[in-house]
Image (spheres, rainbow, N blue to C red):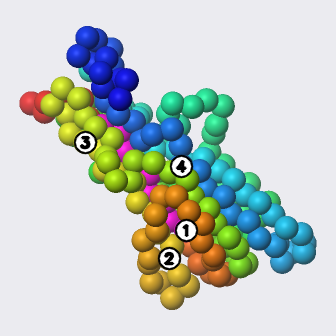
Amino acid sequence: MLFKALWRALPERIPAASQGSMNNLTIGGTDSRTGREFAYYETIAGGMGARAARGGVSGVHTHMTNSLNTPAEALEYAYPLRVRVYALRKGSGGRGRRRGGEGVVREIETLVPARMSLLADRRTRAPYGLGGGEDAKPGRDMIVHRGGRARKIGSKGSWELEAGDRVRIETPGGGGHGKRR
């Protein structure tokens, strides 16, 4: 909101809305390989809002520092989890003279029964565009059960997962900047 208010005074220096601060995902349970409890925590990146002179960056953390992605190989080695999808979320950045950055799709399968918690924003209200740029796509989250049935979940809460269930996080893109020519 502060950026949106400052845009009127500094339109060439203020970016459109980004994906939010972070998408917090935790998964915990008992690792059948060791018999020990595990707890996995990750912040999942999204799209950065476009600026007057440049498009937004895709698949980055915004409005926070000192956080990087967890490589799939490291996650799978350390935890009874499998990364099924890790890609940019095509078409999630807002259109404009400068396009907003793309969000991320992260889908993780649990190999053991587990409990998952999510704390994320910008699921209802999309990251806004500025100067005639379009809003980005808001995020969405779901659990995909072993049989393939997907169930939409809220952006804040905890859920029980069975072995073979997957949590799919689709993070918001960044808003576009300026009218398209």
Of label 3 and label 2, which has the lower sequence position?
3
Numbered circle sitting on residue 144: 2
**Residue 58 can be seen, yes or no:** no
The N terminus lies in which quarter of the figure?
top left
Describe residue 46's horizontal placement relative to residue 175 as left or right.
Answer: right
Q: According to the image, label 3 marks what residue?
A: 135
Report the front residue among 132 and 109.
Answer: 132
**Dot 1: within a 10 Å radius of its alpha carbon, few (fewer than 14), some, or many (20 or more) residues?**
many
Task: Give the Cα separation between the discs numbered 3 and 4.
Answer: 19 Å
Q: According to the image, label 4 marks what residue?
A: 23
Cβ–Cβ under 8 Å for marks 2 and 1: yes
Task: Give the Cα separation between the discs numbered 1 and 3.
Answer: 26 Å
- Residue at point 64% right, 37% down? 67
Instruction: Choose mark 2 or mark 4, whichever is in front.
Output: 4
Task: Give the Cα separation between the discs numbered 4 and 1.
Answer: 13 Å
The percent coordinates of residue 179 (x first, y second) are 13, 30
Describe residue 157's horizontal placement relative to residue 3 as left or right.
Answer: right
